[in-house]
Amino acid sequence: MLARPRILLASARTRIAGHEALDPLRSLFNDLSEREIKFVELAWRGTRRPGIRALAISISWLGNGAIYPIIALPLWYMAHWVARPLVAAALSMAIAHLLYPWLKAACARSRPCNLRDSLEPLLASLDEHSFPSGHAMTLAAALIPLVQAVPIVWPLALGFWLAMAWARMGCGHHYPSDIAAGGLLGATIALPITFLS
């Protein structure tokens, strides 16, 4: 399951590597990283207590893929009308995962834990680049169709998305702008698919 994103990112990186036109964008991200690192350090310091650390690791690990069947199975059994939003969620996630390796390779933004030696990552990352956050993107792409189908769960969905955002910073893997961009990308893909389905 984890090999596929690495293969896509390697392919994208190979095709984009020598493009000097991307240098200003990469320079912008270097400057932005220096400005945002303090927020990551704050979140990371908040994970020093063992229970909080375990929570951040668990939430982040769930975002590697385990959370999606956990979200989908109860909804699948709720009613037959939930099948359409589940298909919309799957399609949104698939499209997002076709785009994001190219964005990661184009931006080539180093993860916070690679910028500061003091930010020891709490768990291994799935790839070397941080922008945009694939976890925030995928979760937004999955949750938007489901919230549209079952609106009463929106506080739970928002809460879990915010918990994922915190966990990714707390693990030293992402800057706030990575998470915001990932969520925006996932939402931008999921909203039209959701309303057209």
Image (cartoon, rainbow, N blue to C red):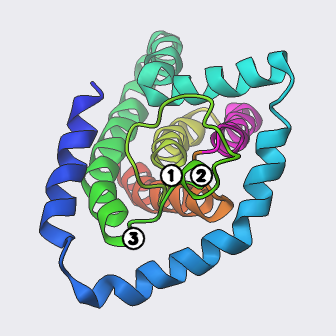
Q: Nearer the viewer, mark 1 or mark 2?
A: 2
| Disc on res. 133 | 1
Magenta stretch containing residue 153, yes or no? yes
Q: Residue 110, labelled with which disc? A: none
Check disc 1 and report its element: helix, strand or loop.
Answer: loop
The percent coordinates of residue 40 (x first, y second) are 73, 53
**Where on the picture, by quarter, is residue 47?**
top right
Quick one: label 3 or label 1, which is nearer the N terminus?
Answer: 3
* Residue at image mark 2: 174
Question: The disc labelled 2 sits on which kind of residue?
Answer: His
Q: Nearer the viewer, residue 85 or 35?
A: 35
Specify which label sits upstream in the sequence, 3 or 2. 3
Compared across the picture, whether 151 is left or right of 64 comes to right
Q: Is residue 24 above or below residue 11?
A: below
Indicate the amino acid at tag 3.
Cys
The residue lying at 39 percent from left, 70 percent from top is: 107
Q: Residue at x 28, y 43 (%)?
A: 94
